[in-house]
Amino acid sequence: MKMASRELLASTCRHPAPFSTSLVAPKSVPSVSSSRISAALPLLRSSSCSQLYSALRTRRNVDRSPASQTAIGRSRRHIGVVPRAKKDEENATDGIVLTTERDDEDFSAAAIEPGWGWNKTTKELVAYGLLVAAVPIVPLLPRFEWSGAFYFLFLAVWSVYVGSHRSLMKKPPQKMSLNQGLAVPLFCSASLFGFYCLLRFFPDLDLRTFISAYLGVAGAVAVGSNIVEPFRLLLPDSTSWRVDLPKWLVQDDGSPVHLTVTPADIAAGAVGVLATIASKQAGAPFTLKNFIAVCIVTELLQLLSLGTFTTAAAMLSGLLLYDVFWVFGSSHVFGDNVMVTVATSSAFDGPMKLIFPRFGEGAMNPYSILGLGDIAAPGLLIAMMLRFDRSRARLSSSADESSSPDKTYFVTCLASYIFGLTVTVVANTVSGAAQPALLYLVPSLLLGVFAVAAFRSEASLLLDYKDETLMSAIPVKSEDETK
Protein backbone atom coordinates (compact mmCIF):
# COMPACT_ATOMS: atom_id res chain seq x y z
CA MET A 1 0.00 0.00 0.00
CA LYS A 2 2.81 2.41 0.82
CA MET A 3 4.49 1.70 -2.52
CA ALA A 4 1.26 2.40 -4.39
CA SER A 5 0.72 5.65 -2.51
CA ARG A 6 4.24 6.73 -3.20
CA GLU A 7 3.90 5.99 -6.91
CA LEU A 8 0.68 7.98 -7.09
CA LEU A 9 2.16 11.04 -5.40
CA ALA A 10 5.28 10.79 -7.54
CA SER A 11 3.25 10.80 -10.77
CA THR A 12 1.16 13.67 -9.44
CA CYS A 13 3.95 15.94 -8.26
CA ARG A 14 6.53 15.86 -11.05
CA HIS A 15 4.73 18.69 -12.80
CA PRO A 16 6.51 22.09 -12.65
CA ALA A 17 4.74 24.43 -10.27
CA PRO A 18 5.52 27.85 -8.82
CA PHE A 19 6.05 26.70 -5.29
CA SER A 20 9.10 27.34 -3.23
CA THR A 21 8.80 25.01 -0.24
CA SER A 22 9.33 21.34 -1.03
CA LEU A 23 8.56 18.31 1.08
CA VAL A 24 10.88 15.45 0.11
CA ALA A 25 10.02 11.86 0.90
CA PRO A 26 12.76 9.53 -0.36
CA LYS A 27 11.57 6.33 1.25
CA SER A 28 8.03 6.72 2.45
CA VAL A 29 5.15 9.13 2.43
CA PRO A 30 4.91 11.11 5.67
CA SER A 31 1.78 12.51 7.19
CA VAL A 32 0.73 15.63 5.33
CA SER A 33 -1.19 18.39 7.03
CA SER A 34 -4.59 19.30 5.63
CA SER A 35 -3.50 22.90 5.05
CA ARG A 36 -0.76 21.76 2.70
CA ILE A 37 -2.97 19.31 0.91
CA SER A 38 -5.50 22.11 0.29
CA ALA A 39 -2.94 23.94 -1.79
CA ALA A 40 -2.68 20.93 -4.12
CA LEU A 41 -6.45 20.81 -4.76
CA PRO A 42 -6.19 21.87 -8.45
CA LEU A 43 -4.33 18.64 -9.14
CA LEU A 44 -7.14 16.48 -7.87
CA ARG A 45 -9.43 16.90 -10.84
CA SER A 46 -10.65 13.37 -11.46
CA SER A 47 -13.24 11.61 -9.31
CA SER A 48 -10.70 9.04 -8.18
CA CYS A 49 -8.29 11.76 -7.10
CA SER A 50 -11.11 13.38 -5.14
CA GLN A 51 -11.50 10.17 -3.15
CA LEU A 52 -7.82 10.21 -2.33
CA TYR A 53 -8.01 13.89 -1.40
CA SER A 54 -10.92 13.23 0.98
CA ALA A 55 -8.94 10.45 2.59
CA LEU A 56 -5.97 12.72 3.12
CA ARG A 57 -8.18 15.43 4.59
CA THR A 58 -9.92 13.19 7.08
CA ARG A 59 -7.24 10.69 8.03
CA ARG A 60 -4.08 12.84 7.48
CA ASN A 61 -2.26 9.79 6.17
CA VAL A 62 -2.82 8.19 2.81
CA ASP A 63 -1.95 4.73 4.09
CA ARG A 64 -4.82 4.73 6.59
CA SER A 65 -7.64 5.20 4.08
CA PRO A 66 -8.95 2.07 2.34
CA ALA A 67 -10.68 4.28 -0.25
CA SER A 68 -7.32 5.42 -1.57
CA GLN A 69 -6.39 1.85 -2.57
CA THR A 70 -9.07 1.83 -5.26
CA ALA A 71 -8.21 5.34 -6.40
CA ILE A 72 -4.49 4.78 -6.80
CA GLY A 73 -4.47 2.69 -9.95
CA ARG A 74 -6.96 4.87 -11.81
CA SER A 75 -5.42 8.18 -10.70
CA ARG A 76 -2.06 7.23 -12.13
CA ARG A 77 -3.71 6.79 -15.52
CA HIS A 78 -5.81 9.96 -15.26
CA ILE A 79 -3.17 12.55 -14.53
CA GLY A 80 -1.08 13.85 -17.42
CA VAL A 81 2.48 14.15 -16.12
CA VAL A 82 4.89 16.81 -17.29
CA PRO A 83 8.49 16.49 -16.00
CA ARG A 84 9.65 19.39 -13.86
CA ALA A 85 13.15 19.31 -15.26
CA LYS A 86 15.70 16.83 -16.45
CA LYS A 87 17.34 16.95 -13.07
CA ASP A 88 14.12 15.88 -11.37
CA GLU A 89 13.76 12.97 -13.79
CA GLU A 90 17.28 11.80 -13.04
CA ASN A 91 16.63 11.93 -9.30
CA ALA A 92 13.14 10.43 -9.49
CA THR A 93 14.36 7.06 -8.22
CA ASP A 94 15.87 8.64 -5.12
CA GLY A 95 12.65 10.17 -3.90
CA ILE A 96 9.66 12.31 -4.74
CA VAL A 97 9.14 16.02 -4.41
CA LEU A 98 5.78 17.02 -2.98
CA THR A 99 5.40 20.77 -3.24
CA THR A 100 2.20 22.06 -1.75
CA GLU A 101 2.94 25.22 0.18
CA ARG A 102 2.92 28.37 -1.95
CA ASP A 103 5.27 31.21 -1.08
CA ASP A 104 4.53 34.89 -1.63
CA GLU A 105 8.03 35.44 -2.94
CA ASP A 106 8.74 35.28 -6.67
CA PHE A 107 10.07 31.99 -7.89
CA SER A 108 13.10 32.16 -10.12
CA ALA A 109 13.00 32.10 -13.89
CA ALA A 110 14.67 28.71 -13.84
CA ALA A 111 11.63 27.23 -12.11
CA ILE A 112 9.42 27.63 -15.18
CA GLU A 113 9.63 26.69 -18.83
CA PRO A 114 12.38 28.16 -21.00
CA GLY A 115 11.38 31.43 -22.62
CA TRP A 116 8.74 32.37 -20.05
CA GLY A 117 11.10 33.76 -17.42
CA TRP A 118 11.03 37.39 -16.31
CA ASN A 119 12.61 37.93 -12.90
CA LYS A 120 16.39 38.31 -12.91
CA THR A 121 16.56 38.32 -16.71
CA THR A 122 18.03 40.75 -19.21
CA LYS A 123 14.55 41.72 -20.36
CA GLU A 124 13.63 42.84 -16.87
CA LEU A 125 16.76 44.94 -16.45
CA VAL A 126 16.34 46.60 -19.86
CA ALA A 127 12.67 47.38 -19.20
CA TYR A 128 13.26 49.05 -15.85
CA GLY A 129 16.38 50.75 -17.17
CA LEU A 130 14.32 52.43 -19.90
CA LEU A 131 11.66 53.54 -17.42
CA VAL A 132 14.16 55.01 -14.96
CA ALA A 133 16.08 56.73 -17.76
CA ALA A 134 12.86 58.34 -19.03
CA VAL A 135 12.38 60.25 -15.74
CA PRO A 136 15.25 62.74 -16.24
CA ILE A 137 15.59 62.53 -20.03
CA VAL A 138 12.03 63.12 -21.32
CA PRO A 139 11.67 66.65 -19.85
CA LEU A 140 14.89 67.65 -21.67
CA LEU A 141 13.83 66.42 -25.12
CA PRO A 142 12.53 68.91 -27.70
CA ARG A 143 8.74 68.94 -27.88
CA PHE A 144 6.49 68.91 -30.90
CA GLU A 145 2.81 68.35 -31.49
CA TRP A 146 2.94 64.56 -31.21
CA SER A 147 5.44 64.33 -28.33
CA GLY A 148 2.75 63.54 -25.79
CA ALA A 149 1.24 60.84 -27.97
CA PHE A 150 4.55 58.98 -28.35
CA TYR A 151 5.28 59.37 -24.64
CA PHE A 152 1.88 58.01 -23.60
CA LEU A 153 2.24 55.13 -26.06
CA PHE A 154 5.65 54.22 -24.63
CA LEU A 155 4.45 54.25 -21.01
CA ALA A 156 1.19 52.41 -21.74
CA VAL A 157 2.88 49.62 -23.71
CA TRP A 158 5.66 49.39 -21.11
CA SER A 159 3.12 49.05 -18.29
CA VAL A 160 1.14 46.33 -20.05
CA TYR A 161 4.21 44.39 -21.15
CA VAL A 162 5.93 44.44 -17.75
CA GLY A 163 2.74 43.87 -15.76
CA SER A 164 1.77 40.90 -17.94
CA HIS A 165 5.14 39.22 -17.51
CA ARG A 166 5.20 39.93 -13.80
CA SER A 167 1.89 38.06 -13.52
CA LEU A 168 3.70 34.92 -14.75
CA MET A 169 6.20 35.03 -11.93
CA LYS A 170 3.86 35.30 -8.96
CA LYS A 171 1.36 32.93 -7.48
CA PRO A 172 -1.84 32.94 -9.58
CA PRO A 173 -3.54 36.34 -9.43
CA GLN A 174 -6.78 36.87 -7.55
CA LYS A 175 -9.56 35.85 -9.94
CA MET A 176 -12.64 37.92 -10.65
CA SER A 177 -16.04 36.28 -11.14
CA LEU A 178 -18.47 37.17 -13.92
CA ASN A 179 -20.79 38.97 -11.51
CA GLN A 180 -17.88 41.00 -10.18
CA GLY A 181 -16.83 41.86 -13.72
CA LEU A 182 -20.32 43.09 -14.54
CA ALA A 183 -20.38 45.16 -11.35
CA VAL A 184 -17.13 46.99 -12.12
CA PRO A 185 -18.67 49.56 -14.53
CA LEU A 186 -21.47 50.26 -12.04
CA PHE A 187 -19.01 50.73 -9.19
CA CYS A 188 -16.85 53.03 -11.32
CA SER A 189 -19.88 55.09 -12.30
CA ALA A 190 -21.00 55.47 -8.69
CA SER A 191 -17.49 56.45 -7.58
CA LEU A 192 -17.02 58.95 -10.40
CA PHE A 193 -20.38 60.62 -9.86
CA GLY A 194 -19.82 60.66 -6.10
CA PHE A 195 -16.53 62.52 -6.48
CA TYR A 196 -18.16 64.90 -8.94
CA CYS A 197 -20.91 65.73 -6.43
CA LEU A 198 -18.34 66.38 -3.72
CA LEU A 199 -16.41 68.73 -5.99
CA ARG A 200 -19.50 70.59 -7.14
CA PHE A 201 -21.59 70.89 -3.96
CA PHE A 202 -18.80 70.90 -1.34
CA PRO A 203 -16.03 72.96 -2.96
CA ASP A 204 -14.45 73.77 0.42
CA LEU A 205 -14.09 70.12 1.38
CA ASP A 206 -10.41 69.16 1.49
CA LEU A 207 -10.20 65.91 -0.45
CA ARG A 208 -6.66 66.48 -1.60
CA THR A 209 -4.98 65.58 1.70
CA PHE A 210 -6.80 62.25 2.08
CA ILE A 211 -6.39 61.22 -1.57
CA SER A 212 -2.76 62.32 -1.62
CA ALA A 213 -1.96 60.24 1.48
CA TYR A 214 -3.75 57.17 0.13
CA LEU A 215 -2.09 57.35 -3.30
CA GLY A 216 1.25 58.09 -1.63
CA VAL A 217 1.19 54.84 0.31
CA ALA A 218 -0.01 52.88 -2.74
CA GLY A 219 2.69 54.46 -4.89
CA ALA A 220 5.51 53.75 -2.43
CA VAL A 221 4.49 50.07 -2.14
CA ALA A 222 4.12 49.70 -5.92
CA VAL A 223 7.51 51.24 -6.69
CA GLY A 224 9.25 49.09 -4.09
CA SER A 225 7.55 45.93 -5.35
CA ASN A 226 8.56 46.69 -8.94
CA ILE A 227 12.22 47.42 -8.42
CA VAL A 228 13.04 44.89 -5.71
CA GLU A 229 13.89 42.14 -8.22
CA PRO A 230 16.35 44.26 -10.25
CA PHE A 231 17.91 45.27 -6.94
CA ARG A 232 18.36 41.61 -6.02
CA LEU A 233 20.60 41.24 -9.04
CA LEU A 234 22.76 44.14 -7.88
CA LEU A 235 22.84 43.57 -4.12
CA PRO A 236 24.04 40.38 -2.41
CA ASP A 237 21.49 37.99 -0.95
CA SER A 238 23.95 36.47 1.49
CA THR A 239 22.79 38.79 4.30
CA SER A 240 19.22 38.71 5.59
CA TRP A 241 17.33 39.52 8.74
CA ARG A 242 14.36 37.75 10.26
CA VAL A 243 11.53 39.92 11.55
CA ASP A 244 9.01 38.14 13.80
CA LEU A 245 5.55 39.67 13.60
CA PRO A 246 3.42 39.79 16.76
CA LYS A 247 1.02 36.89 16.94
CA TRP A 248 -1.82 39.23 17.92
CA LEU A 249 -1.26 41.14 14.68
CA VAL A 250 -1.07 38.28 12.18
CA GLN A 251 -0.87 34.51 12.37
CA ASP A 252 -1.08 31.51 10.08
CA ASP A 253 -3.24 28.68 11.42
CA GLY A 254 -2.28 29.65 14.94
CA SER A 255 1.44 29.80 14.15
CA PRO A 256 3.49 33.01 14.29
CA VAL A 257 4.50 34.67 11.03
CA HIS A 258 7.92 36.08 10.25
CA LEU A 259 9.41 38.07 7.40
CA THR A 260 12.84 37.66 5.88
CA VAL A 261 14.31 41.03 4.91
CA THR A 262 17.29 41.42 2.56
CA PRO A 263 19.34 44.48 1.60
CA ALA A 264 17.47 44.58 -1.71
CA ASP A 265 14.14 44.81 0.12
CA ILE A 266 15.36 47.70 2.25
CA ALA A 267 16.82 49.56 -0.74
CA ALA A 268 13.68 49.08 -2.85
CA GLY A 269 11.44 50.23 -0.01
CA ALA A 270 13.59 53.30 0.55
CA VAL A 271 13.48 54.21 -3.13
CA GLY A 272 9.68 53.86 -3.14
CA VAL A 273 9.29 56.18 -0.15
CA LEU A 274 11.78 58.75 -1.50
CA ALA A 275 10.16 58.74 -4.95
CA THR A 276 6.74 59.36 -3.42
CA ILE A 277 8.02 62.22 -1.22
CA ALA A 278 9.93 63.80 -4.11
CA SER A 279 6.86 63.70 -6.37
CA LYS A 280 4.98 65.83 -3.82
CA GLN A 281 7.55 68.63 -3.87
CA ALA A 282 7.10 71.81 -5.87
CA GLY A 283 8.93 71.66 -9.17
CA ALA A 284 9.02 67.86 -9.26
CA PRO A 285 9.20 66.59 -12.86
CA PHE A 286 5.95 65.24 -14.25
CA THR A 287 7.85 62.14 -15.32
CA LEU A 288 8.38 61.17 -11.69
CA LYS A 289 4.62 61.11 -11.07
CA ASN A 290 4.19 59.06 -14.23
CA PHE A 291 6.89 56.66 -13.04
CA ILE A 292 4.91 55.98 -9.87
CA ALA A 293 1.66 55.69 -11.84
CA VAL A 294 2.92 52.97 -14.19
CA CYS A 295 4.34 51.04 -11.23
CA ILE A 296 0.82 51.03 -9.75
CA VAL A 297 -0.55 49.66 -13.03
CA THR A 298 1.99 46.83 -13.24
CA GLU A 299 1.28 45.94 -9.61
CA LEU A 300 -2.44 45.71 -10.38
CA LEU A 301 -1.86 43.52 -13.45
CA GLN A 302 0.19 40.99 -11.49
CA LEU A 303 -2.25 40.86 -8.58
CA LEU A 304 -5.61 40.62 -10.35
CA SER A 305 -7.02 38.25 -12.99
CA LEU A 306 -10.28 38.42 -14.90
CA GLY A 307 -10.58 34.62 -14.60
CA THR A 308 -12.13 33.83 -17.97
CA PHE A 309 -12.38 35.44 -21.38
CA THR A 310 -16.15 35.75 -20.91
CA THR A 311 -15.63 37.83 -17.77
CA ALA A 312 -13.04 39.96 -19.54
CA ALA A 313 -15.31 40.63 -22.52
CA ALA A 314 -18.27 41.46 -20.27
CA MET A 315 -16.30 43.82 -18.04
CA LEU A 316 -14.59 45.62 -20.94
CA SER A 317 -17.89 46.02 -22.81
CA GLY A 318 -19.46 47.53 -19.70
CA LEU A 319 -16.50 49.87 -19.22
CA LEU A 320 -16.80 50.95 -22.85
CA LEU A 321 -20.38 52.09 -22.19
CA TYR A 322 -19.24 53.71 -18.94
CA ASP A 323 -16.48 55.65 -20.69
CA VAL A 324 -18.68 56.79 -23.57
CA PHE A 325 -21.51 57.98 -21.34
CA TRP A 326 -19.42 59.93 -18.85
CA VAL A 327 -17.31 61.57 -21.56
CA PHE A 328 -19.92 62.23 -24.26
CA GLY A 329 -23.31 61.89 -22.56
CA SER A 330 -22.87 63.35 -19.08
CA SER A 331 -22.85 66.95 -20.33
CA HIS A 332 -26.34 66.46 -21.79
CA VAL A 333 -27.68 64.98 -18.55
CA PHE A 334 -25.90 67.02 -15.87
CA GLY A 335 -24.88 70.08 -17.86
CA ASP A 336 -21.20 69.35 -17.29
CA ASN A 337 -18.63 66.84 -18.52
CA VAL A 338 -18.31 64.77 -15.37
CA MET A 339 -15.30 62.74 -16.48
CA VAL A 340 -13.23 65.76 -17.52
CA THR A 341 -14.22 67.74 -14.41
CA VAL A 342 -13.03 65.01 -12.05
CA ALA A 343 -9.92 64.10 -14.07
CA THR A 344 -8.66 67.70 -14.26
CA SER A 345 -9.47 68.60 -10.64
CA SER A 346 -6.52 69.59 -8.46
CA ALA A 347 -7.93 67.35 -5.72
CA PHE A 348 -6.83 64.34 -7.77
CA ASP A 349 -3.30 65.53 -8.40
CA GLY A 350 -1.56 62.22 -7.86
CA PRO A 351 -0.35 59.04 -9.58
CA MET A 352 -3.76 58.07 -10.93
CA LYS A 353 -3.21 59.35 -14.49
CA LEU A 354 -0.41 59.98 -16.96
CA ILE A 355 0.28 63.62 -17.79
CA PHE A 356 2.30 65.45 -20.43
CA PRO A 357 2.63 69.23 -20.96
CA ARG A 358 0.52 70.46 -23.85
CA PHE A 359 2.25 71.77 -26.96
CA GLY A 360 1.68 75.50 -27.39
CA GLU A 361 0.28 78.16 -25.11
CA GLY A 362 -3.19 79.24 -24.09
CA ALA A 363 -4.66 75.80 -23.33
CA MET A 364 -7.28 75.66 -20.57
CA ASN A 365 -5.61 72.58 -19.09
CA PRO A 366 -1.80 72.69 -19.24
CA TYR A 367 -1.51 68.91 -19.46
CA SER A 368 -2.69 66.16 -21.76
CA ILE A 369 -4.09 63.28 -19.71
CA LEU A 370 -4.34 59.51 -20.11
CA GLY A 371 -6.23 57.80 -17.27
CA LEU A 372 -4.73 54.70 -15.68
CA GLY A 373 -8.01 52.90 -16.29
CA ASP A 374 -7.34 53.12 -20.02
CA ILE A 375 -4.17 51.11 -19.39
CA ALA A 376 -5.17 48.80 -16.53
CA ALA A 377 -8.54 47.58 -17.86
CA PRO A 378 -7.26 46.47 -21.30
CA GLY A 379 -4.04 45.35 -19.64
CA LEU A 380 -5.90 42.77 -17.54
CA LEU A 381 -7.11 41.08 -20.74
CA ILE A 382 -3.65 41.26 -22.34
CA ALA A 383 -2.01 39.75 -19.24
CA MET A 384 -4.57 36.94 -19.20
CA MET A 385 -3.86 36.23 -22.87
CA LEU A 386 -0.16 35.85 -22.05
CA ARG A 387 -1.07 33.27 -19.40
CA PHE A 388 -3.39 31.65 -21.94
CA ASP A 389 -0.45 31.38 -24.36
CA ARG A 390 1.57 29.65 -21.65
CA SER A 391 -1.33 27.28 -20.94
CA ARG A 392 -1.54 26.45 -24.65
CA ALA A 393 2.18 25.72 -24.70
CA ARG A 394 1.74 23.25 -21.85
CA LEU A 395 -1.24 21.58 -23.47
CA SER A 396 0.65 21.07 -26.72
CA SER A 397 2.41 17.71 -26.65
CA SER A 398 4.56 18.77 -29.61
CA ALA A 399 5.99 21.86 -27.93
CA ASP A 400 9.73 22.21 -28.47
CA GLU A 401 11.49 23.51 -25.38
CA SER A 402 14.40 24.79 -27.46
CA SER A 403 12.19 27.03 -29.60
CA SER A 404 10.98 30.46 -28.59
CA PRO A 405 7.63 30.50 -26.74
CA ASP A 406 4.47 30.95 -28.79
CA LYS A 407 2.91 34.23 -27.58
CA THR A 408 0.49 34.67 -30.47
CA TYR A 409 -2.46 35.92 -28.44
CA PHE A 410 -0.33 38.22 -26.31
CA VAL A 411 1.41 39.80 -29.30
CA THR A 412 -1.91 40.20 -31.10
CA CYS A 413 -3.47 41.92 -28.08
CA LEU A 414 -0.46 44.19 -27.67
CA ALA A 415 -0.60 45.18 -31.34
CA SER A 416 -4.35 45.74 -31.08
CA TYR A 417 -3.82 47.94 -28.03
CA ILE A 418 -1.23 50.05 -29.85
CA PHE A 419 -3.61 50.43 -32.79
CA GLY A 420 -6.55 51.41 -30.57
CA LEU A 421 -4.50 53.94 -28.59
CA THR A 422 -3.16 55.46 -31.81
CA VAL A 423 -6.70 55.90 -33.13
CA THR A 424 -7.64 57.55 -29.82
CA VAL A 425 -4.81 60.08 -30.13
CA VAL A 426 -5.69 60.85 -33.75
CA ALA A 427 -9.37 61.32 -32.87
CA ASN A 428 -8.42 63.61 -29.99
CA THR A 429 -6.14 65.71 -32.20
CA VAL A 430 -8.62 65.99 -35.06
CA SER A 431 -11.68 66.75 -32.91
CA GLY A 432 -9.90 68.85 -30.30
CA ALA A 433 -12.15 67.30 -27.64
CA ALA A 434 -11.69 64.65 -24.95
CA GLN A 435 -12.11 61.10 -26.24
CA PRO A 436 -13.20 57.94 -24.39
CA ALA A 437 -10.16 55.77 -25.06
CA LEU A 438 -12.02 52.53 -24.32
CA LEU A 439 -14.34 53.28 -27.25
CA TYR A 440 -11.42 52.46 -29.54
CA LEU A 441 -9.40 50.09 -27.36
CA VAL A 442 -12.07 47.54 -26.42
CA PRO A 443 -13.32 46.73 -29.97
CA SER A 444 -9.73 46.59 -31.21
CA LEU A 445 -8.73 44.10 -28.50
CA LEU A 446 -11.79 41.84 -28.65
CA LEU A 447 -11.82 41.70 -32.44
CA GLY A 448 -8.10 40.92 -32.48
CA VAL A 449 -8.49 38.02 -30.03
CA PHE A 450 -11.54 36.62 -31.82
CA ALA A 451 -9.79 36.85 -35.20
CA VAL A 452 -6.77 34.86 -33.99
CA ALA A 453 -8.95 32.27 -32.24
CA ALA A 454 -11.06 31.80 -35.37
CA PHE A 455 -8.02 31.56 -37.64
CA ARG A 456 -6.39 28.94 -35.40
CA SER A 457 -9.69 27.09 -34.75
CA GLU A 458 -9.26 27.66 -31.02
CA ALA A 459 -12.45 29.57 -30.23
CA SER A 460 -13.79 26.83 -27.96
CA LEU A 461 -10.42 26.53 -26.21
CA LEU A 462 -10.44 30.28 -25.59
CA LEU A 463 -13.99 30.35 -24.25
CA ASP A 464 -13.39 27.32 -22.01
CA TYR A 465 -10.11 28.66 -20.59
CA LYS A 466 -10.03 29.40 -16.88
CA ASP A 467 -7.15 31.35 -15.45
CA GLU A 468 -6.18 28.94 -12.68
CA THR A 469 -2.99 27.75 -11.06
CA LEU A 470 -0.09 26.56 -13.16
CA MET A 471 -0.70 22.94 -12.23
CA SER A 472 -4.33 22.95 -13.33
CA ALA A 473 -3.32 23.88 -16.86
CA ILE A 474 -2.08 20.32 -17.41
CA PRO A 475 -4.45 18.13 -19.44
CA VAL A 476 -6.23 15.37 -17.58
CA LYS A 477 -6.92 12.24 -19.55
CA SER A 478 -10.05 10.22 -18.91
CA GLU A 479 -9.94 6.49 -18.28
CA ASP A 480 -11.53 5.82 -21.69
CA GLU A 481 -8.78 7.79 -23.47
CA THR A 482 -6.07 5.69 -21.85
CA LYS A 483 -7.53 2.39 -22.99
Image (cartoon, rainbow, N blue to C red):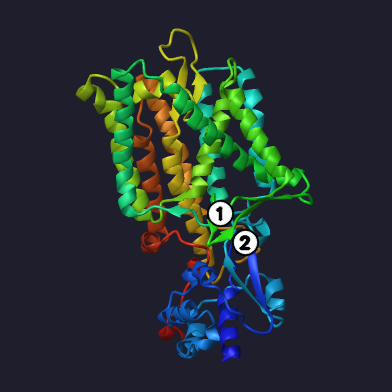
Q: Image check: 215 left or right of 206?
A: right
Residue 297 seen in the figure? yes
Q: Image check: 41 left or right of 13?
A: left
Asked if marks 1 and 2 touch (Cβ < 8 Å), the reply is yes
Q: Which residue is mark 1?
A: 168
- The single residue placed furthest to the front in the displayed view is 248
Image quadrant assignment for residue 25: bottom right
Q: Quadrant of the C terminus?
A: bottom left
Q: Which residue is mark 2?
A: 112
* Helix, strand or loop under label 1: helix
| Residue drawn at x 66%, y 33% as measured from the top left | 271
* Horizontal and vertical percent position of residue 467: 44, 59
Spatial CA distance of label 1 from label 2 is: 9 Å
Q: In this orientation, which residue lies closer to the viewer: 77 or 234?
A: 234
Q: In this orientation, which residue lies closer to the viewer: 155 or 223?
A: 223
Q: Image check: 225 left or right of 321?
A: right
Residue 133: assigned label = none
Q: In this orientation, which residue lies closer to the viewer: 10 or 437?
A: 10
Amino acid type, callout 2: Ile
* Horizontal and vertical percent position of residue 33: 55, 73
Q: Quadrant of the N terminus?
A: bottom right
